[in-house]
Amino acid sequence: MENQIDFKLLAERYKTELLQNCLPFWLKHSVDHEYGGYFSCLARDGSVYDTDKFIWLQGREVWLFAMLYNKLEKKKEWLDCAVQGAEFLKKFGHDGNYDFYFSLTREGRPLVQPYNIFSNTFACMAFAQAAEATGSDEYAEIAKKTFARILERKNCPKGIWEKSYPGTRPMKGFSLPMIICNMALEIENILDDKGLLEETIDTCLHEVLDVFYKPEAGMMVENVSAVDGSMIDCFDGRLINPGHNLEALWFLMNLGVRRGDSGLAGRCVDIALKVIDFGWDREYKGIFYFMDRKGCPPQQLEWDQKLWWVHLESAIAMARGYQLTGRKECLDWFLALDEYMWSHFKDAEYPEWFGYLNRRGEVLLPLKGGKWKGCFHVPRGLFQIWQILDKISEPHGAAHNQ
């Protein structure tokens, strides 16, 4: 089967979708030429239906266009797009102490306090890539200061905005160490203290693989006891997010490549294959959004929806896993995801992809952007998969599985 697959042709499909459909959509519709920053609430045809600006998505779009400028092509329109977004974030995005708000009005007035540490992580990634693209010392300094705030806040991410009652059931979440695993490589070029970078990577690897990964579950759980790292038998303690698992695993595969640790890739693939088998909907295909590790009813009413980012991140994980290990199971899963994504999330009439499907794979919301979906997972996924498939298409491009 592997010999019959034209990886070059597959790669070209993702490349074309990125460069001819996805990126032009965001460049045309999302840039706010009057106030700066980006509109993310875009209807199916790209028209703006809400002008509030969400910091996660502002930072992600800066990062995306700066990253493509740095890694793919020095296109002026990509740099201009990234810089105007970075300037908006610099002026309005944070509280002066480099804690970034959750959302702003169109003009840049704060709407929601900086309670969410992920606003910081995406801003940090944004300014690191923008600094590399422009050579700006100011952007690099903002990235460094934001990274310092992330490290200061990581043990109590929400700070004064933490809503859980202290001491009753203290938990810590998987999302932060997962994001920091990826962020560490994004900011490597602007960090003066390389020892701090390695220490951060070590801590993240330990957190993901030794604390949140539970052999008895076969995957990472979303929340563990903040006291001893044990699993807790409650809604949050039983929660599994297959997409989070698989996204984190391709981050870890990249860390393994960076460190020359081939064993790490193998371990990640072993876990990834268990996760996707657990999360796959055998009746309607696709991957569930939320699951309960014991099979109890999840508290999230949207648990059975099929989301764009879950499938794109899973496809990256399977393509990367196949590239690094040659495991046929990874290729089989990638091809299943490829078929599902292009037949369900791809909009045949307008550019960009749908984000939200019901369990049966029917479009639940026709939006192309909103409070959570912006210029990030689709273009990043298309870029990553294109690059991986392109390398696989080369002679000896995928590892031979012994």
Image: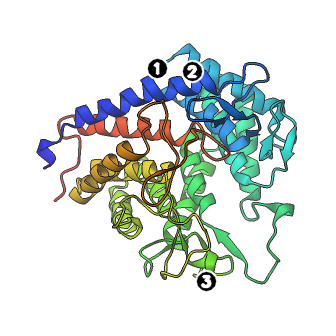
Q: Which mark is residue 232?
A: 3
Report if the CB atoms under discs 3 and 2 are less than 8 Å apart.
no
Q: Nearer the viewer, mark 2 or mark 1?
A: 2
Residue 197 placement (x, y as % from top left): 59, 49
Q: CA distance from mark 3 to mark 2?
A: 46 Å
* Residue on which disc 1 sits: 73
**Circle 1: is it few (<14), some (14-19), or many (20+) Cα within 10 Å?**
few
Residue 72 placement (x, y as % from top left): 45, 25
Residue 362 placement (x, y as % from top left): 45, 52
Amino acid residing under circle 3: Ile
Report if the CB atoms under discs 2 and 1 are less than 8 Å apart.
yes
Counting residues from the N terminus, which is met first, the one under dot 3 or under dot 2? Answer: 2
Q: Is residue 197 left or right of residue 93?
A: left
Occupied quadrant, residue 139: top right
Q: Who's the residue at 81% across and 39% down the image?
A: 104
Counting residues from the N terminus, which is met first, the one under dot 2 or under dot 1? Answer: 1
Residue 334 placement (x, y as % from top left): 31, 51
User: Relative to 292, does residue 67 appear above or below in the rendering?
Assistant: above
Occupied quadrant, residue 4: top left
* Residue on which disc 2 sits: 78
Q: CA distance from mark 2 to mark 1?
A: 9 Å
